Amino acid sequence: MGDLQGTMAMTLAVELHAVSLDKRLTDVTCQCLKGQSIHLLGENGAGKSSLLEVIAGLTDADNGHCRIDDTPVNALTLPELARFRAFHAQSSAASFALSVNDYLHFYASSQVSPLPTLLEFTMEVSHLLTRRITTLSGGEKQRVELCRALLQVWPAIEAGDALVLLDEPLQGLDIRHQYALMALTKALTGKGNTVILTSHDIGLSANNADQIWLLKNGSLVANGTPTEVVNEFNLNATFGCHFAVKKLENFLQIQVCDPIVMP
């Protein structure tokens, strides 16, 4: 594993080839490079979370393969993955009324303090440290959970060698913290880390992602840069709505005109 870790630290990337999962994913083929931010978009039940779980090594594909730096993800043990792969689930429940400080300490790598400056600047949780995790609002808990996931692999993040997987990280966040999270993902990829997240905010993703993967009923509709992928045809096919897409300088403006109603 030593040689693998050394290579992975230099060229971390994700490759999916013909990945299928019973009733959830069908023949998904795509890849991303180290240092990119990938946003998975699609309707509820499109397969976004399932695809993220395959990449995370938490669910084995029925067919096809997922590789991290040319190594099959299912060839890596969970302890090996845990050193460089962060995973933030769509929902979680705290079983004990720990303080936020103790909760973060429990999950954090022993090599880091609970609140690196980058996390505190973007997620703003220092004032929550003395609170019980069970007393937090939904948005407050979401910010703590994002910190928890990242702290687990913070040494790898500092080295620019982490794979960060976030399932619906915008859920429950107010608008300021949604944009703060986008700033955080850009800071992470700027260090060389790779970020893959799921989202329902097409506009936010279109203007912050390096790549967008559109999923519909478990299949990949399109993947590529936002300019290549975010157009009226692809969005109509993915979401069943009529869209208007305009580019104003470097900003993609997306408007939902009306739903496509079948007779």
Image (cartoon, rainbow, N blue to C red):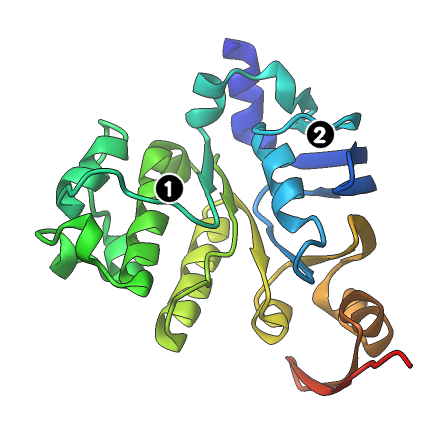
Task: Give above or below for 15 relative to 38.
Answer: above
Task: Give above or below for 130 relative to 152.
Answer: below
Can you name the residue that lies furthest to the left here? 130
Task: Give above or below for 252 relative to 85.
Answer: below
Q: Earlier in the sequence, mark 1 or mark 2?
A: 2
CA neighbours of label 2 inside 10 A, class few (<14), some (14 to 19), many (20+): many
| Residue toward you, 10 or 146 | 146
Residue found 61% across the figure and 62% down from its top: 209
Q: Kindly identify which numbered label has been placed on residue 149.
A: 1
Q: CB of mark 1 within 8 Å of CB of mark 2?
A: no
Task: Give above or below for 11 relative to 167.
Answer: above
Q: For numbered disc 2, what is the local secondary structure? A: strand
Q: Position of residue 240 (x, y in %)?
A: 80, 73
* Quadrant housing residue 259: bottom right
Q: Kindly identify which numbered label has been placed on residue 98.
A: none
Q: Amino acid at mark 2?
A: Cys
* Quadrant housing residue 135: bottom left
Please say whether residue 25 is visible from this viewpoint.
Answer: yes
Q: For numbered disc 1, what is the local secondary structure? A: helix
| Residue toward you, 236 or 193 | 236
Q: Amino acid at mark 1?
A: Ala
Q: Indicate the quadrant containing the C terminus: top left, top right, bottom left or bottom right.
A: bottom right
| Residue toward you, 23 or 106 | 23
Left or right of 55 on screen, residue 16: right
Q: Position of residue 193 (x, y in %)?
A: 50, 43
Q: Position of residue 159 (x, y in %)?
A: 40, 35
* Quadrant housing residue 252: bottom right
Residue found 24% across the figure and 57% down from its top: 120
| Residue toward you, 97 or 9 | 97
Q: Kindly identify which numbered label has been placed on residue 66.
A: 2
